[in-house]
Amino acid sequence: MSGHSTIERPPLAEAPVPTAVPAAPRRPGRQKRLTKWLNSGIVQALLIVVALVWITPLAGLFLSSLRSERDNASDGWWTALSDPSQLSLDNYTALLEDSGITAAFWNTVLISVPTTILVVGIAALAGYAFAWLDFPGRDAIFLVVVGLLVVPVQIGLLPVAKLFGAIGLFGTIAGVVLFHVAYGLPFAIFLLRNYFAEIPREMLEAARMDGGSEWRIFSRLVLPLGRPALASLAIFQFLWVWNDMLVALLFADSGSQPLTVALQSQMRQFGSNIGVLAPGAFLSLVVPLVVFFAFQRHFVQGVMAGSVK
């Protein structure tokens, strides 16, 4: 051993472990703030007021349809709330016994249902073709379809009426249906084409690689995926045709007139014939409400489609 002694160094003190600094609380996002604002009492009260404003005319129409013409002429419909003895189904019984009104109701069904089916079916085929099939002039034709959206209905009334008169369709249900189909297709094709174009291309290519034909891909893949958009379009188209009076007033005769024209003629002939107009108007209102609530879930999905990635 040498004479030099080794000096032992003292052990290094362990460095203190820094404590984690708590992260600053995140500010609520815009969506959370909006949700919180919508759930506030003021907004809820405002929505209740808006709902009452919309429901009050409907309630008044319904109560007026259950009161006699004498009661409706003497005081307001709100008196039935304190005197329920005024309410009866006599107006509806008389309405259903009126052959003109019942025939007009079925004419409305015969116009609205085929128009909706034809518009949705043709637009679905055309929308798929414009979105996923390659053919000469595809983009140019689609631009023409989009351009037809700006053509007002009033411009085509007289020329189409002359055309239908020449070929024997004027004054028939078929003529009214064809006119509604022609003017409903541009918007329907535009809507469905944009919706079908959002379907992932890889999904369609995988179906083609598995040997699927275009028709099979369209019927088994595209249509199920496009059900929300199809349901929304069907609801809108049905409501437009069911509540239409302008086209039917020009193209339908007394044997093919829908319910809107029949009620309008009652107003013209009998003035304030509330005993017929009130139940007829409420009957005309019930069917669209039933259709809307029956397809409400699909309608909401179609409206919200594409809003969330």
Image (spheres, rainbow, N blue to C red):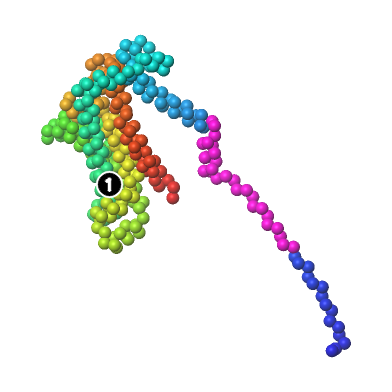
| Corner quadrant of residue 208 | bottom left
- Give x and y (percent) for residue 234: 30, 39
Q: Is residue 61 left or right of residue 154?
A: right
The type of residue carrying mark 1 is: Ala
The residue sitting at 30% across, 49% down in the picture is 223
| Corner quadrant of residue 108 | top left
- Magenta stretch? 16-42
Q: Is residue 52 above or below residue 225?
A: above
Badge 1: how crowded within 10 Å, few (<14), some, or many (20+)? many
- Give x and y (percent) for residue 182: 23, 39
The residue sitting at 25% across, 34% down in the picture is 112
Q: Residue furthest bottom?
A: 1
Q: Is residue 135 left or right of residue 171?
A: right
Residue identifier under label 1 = 124
The residue sitting at 35% across, 59% down in the picture is 202
> Regarding mark 1 in the picture, which secondary structure is present there?
helix
In the image, 87 versus 286, the foreground residue is 87
In the image, 192 versus 222, the foreground residue is 222
All told, the count of numbered labels is 1
Q: Is residue 35 above or below residue 84?
A: below
- Give x and y (percent) for residue 258: 23, 28
